Image (tube, rainbow, N blue to C red):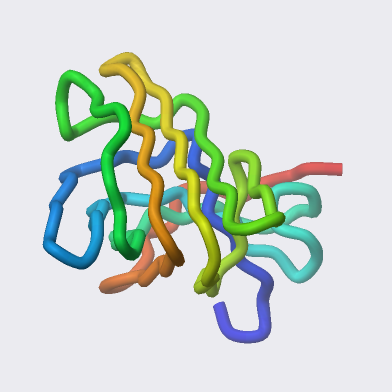
Amino acid sequence: MQNKHCAVEFHDSWVEAIDRTDEAVVLRLEVYLHVSDGRPGQDPGTGWMQQATLTIGSGSIASAPLAANMRISDGSIQVGEEYFGNLAPVPFKHSGAVTLRFEGAEGLLLVKGQGATLTLHGEPRFVEETHWH
């Protein structure tokens, strides 16, 4: 995926676990990645699944879903003045006030904090060719 543009689509991604530490809220995710020579999620490319962690510094959980394992049907993250609705670029590392909102059948996950970093782990698994226009 070198020299390609990449973005996480929250819809079709999964929250696998929610961990709290003294310094952060850490979400263990399986994310759906759009990879493209152009604009991920808009131009043709490929779709992949990959393990990831999303760390929100000084995080607090304002609303928790009924189960920590949830499929995300809709999601967004706002960091400072930047709003990412359902699609976040990779790499993703931002400072500033954070509001993360993931919705799924299991309920709402709402996390607030300071700064957010998405880290990909392991090898991505190919899912499909994507054909947006």
Is 14 placed above or below 42 here?
A: above
Q: Answer whether residue 52 is visible to the viewer in this image.
A: no
The answer to whether residue 8 is seen in the rendering is: yes
Q: Describe residue 121's horizontal placement relative to residue 99 as left or right.
A: left
Q: Is residue 57 left or right of residue 80?
A: left
Identified at 36% across, 71% down, the residue is 119
Residue at point 33% right, 64% down?
Answer: 57
Q: Hey, which residue is sitting farthest bottom in the picture?
A: 2
Q: In the picture, which quadrant includes the N terminus?
A: bottom right
Total count of labels: 0
Where is residue 133? Give x, y as percent.
Answer: 87, 43
| Residue 48 point in image, percent of width and height | 46, 55
Residue most toward the right?
133
Query: Which of 51 and 25 lies nearest the eye of the viewer?
Result: 25
Residue 76's x, y, as percent?
Answer: 55, 40
Residue at 78% from the left image edge and 60% from the top image edge: 39
* Closer-to-camera residue (90/100): 100
* Quadrant of the rendered image containing residue 23: bottom left
Q: Position of residue 108 (x, y in %)?
A: 35, 23
Image vertical order of residue 61 relative to residue 79, above or below: above
| Residue for point 19% across, 33% down | 69
Q: Quadrant of residue 5?
A: bottom right
Compared across the picture, whether 115 is left or right of 6 comes to: left
**In the foreground, 37 or 104:** 104
